Image: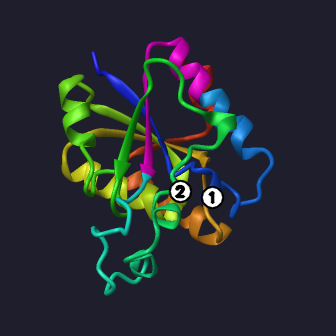
């Protein structure tokens, strides 16, 4: 039998605030609550850096502006309180876009015999895409909760969830995933 984990990625307050969708967090909360109720491990993935962000090269187009930044700018990785971790949940800090990049996620998954990842997060074209590709290369079974992901560009979200992700993952909705539990 496959051991699953629900990955809740980049739902930090400062990120959620840039994606105004009032239905998103309640929907994600439903997936989290269902996972916990059914013994599915919940793993939060945040992006974060040490004070001064020594992990970041100024050449990095996405994160370069944080190189040498004060701790408050580089370490604002608080998870939104509406979907906060509970007892027994794991929080992993990554250093780049993929949940695996610069984190101990792979070690946590393997130590817990997890071989099936259920992906959610912000943004579909960022952490979800990068994590899906790397996880597929690492031979994980994958499910993407399409409405458990957000992107600033609805067309990009649609292309990824309807055309790209199905090549490497099962794609379903939060409601359908919850109903199948």
Q: Residue at x 38, y 62 (%)?
A: 51
Q: Which mark sits nearer the N-terminus, 1 or 2? A: 1
Q: Residue 26 vs residue 136: left or right?
A: right
Q: Residue furthest bottom?
A: 59
Q: Is residue 128 visible?
A: yes
The residue carrying mark 1 is 14
State which quarter of the image contains the C terminus.
top right
Q: Residue 70 vs residue 17: left or right?
A: left
Percent of width and height locating residue 69: 44, 74
| Depth check, front residue: 30 or 55 | 55
Tell me the CA gap for discs 1 and 2. Answer: 7 Å
**Residue 23 sits in which quadrant?**
top right
The residue carrying mark 2 is 76
* Circle nearer the viewer, 1 or 2: 2
26 is within the stretch colored magenta:
no
* Residue stretch rendered in magenta on the structure: 32-46
SS at circle 1: helix
Name the mark on residue 156.
Answer: none
Above or below, 35 relative to 45:
above
Above or below, 164 relative to 59:
above
State which quarter of the image contains the N terminus.
top left
| Depth check, front residue: 159 or 82 | 82
For label 1, the crowd category at 10 Å Cα-Cα, with few meaning under 14, some 14 to 19 and many 20 or more, is some
Q: How did the renderer colour the structure?
A: rainbow
């Amino acid at each position: 039998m496959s051991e699953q984990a629900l990955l809740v990625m980049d739902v930090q307050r400062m990120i959620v605030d840039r994606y105004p969708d009032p239905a998103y967090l309640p929907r994600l909360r439903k997936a989290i609550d269902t996972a916990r109720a059914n013994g599915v491990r919940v793993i939060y993935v945040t992006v974060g850096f040490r004070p001064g962000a020594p992990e970041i090269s100024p050449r990095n187009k996405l994160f370069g502006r944080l190189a040498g930044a004060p701790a408050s700018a580089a370490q604002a990785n608080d998870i939104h309180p509406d979907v906060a971790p509970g007892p027994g949940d794991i929080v992993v800090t990554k250093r780049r876009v993929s949940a695996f990049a610069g984190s101990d996620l792979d070690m946590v998954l393997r130590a817990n015999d997890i071989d099936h990842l259920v992906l959610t997060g912000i943004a579909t074209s960022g952490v979800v895409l990068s994590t899906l590709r790397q996880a597929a290369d690492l031979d994980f079974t994958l499910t993407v909760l399409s409405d458990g992901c957000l992107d600033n560009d609805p067309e990009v979200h649609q292309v990824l969830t309807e055309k790209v992700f199905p090549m490497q993952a099962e794609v379903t909705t939060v409601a359908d995933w919850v109903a199948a539990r």
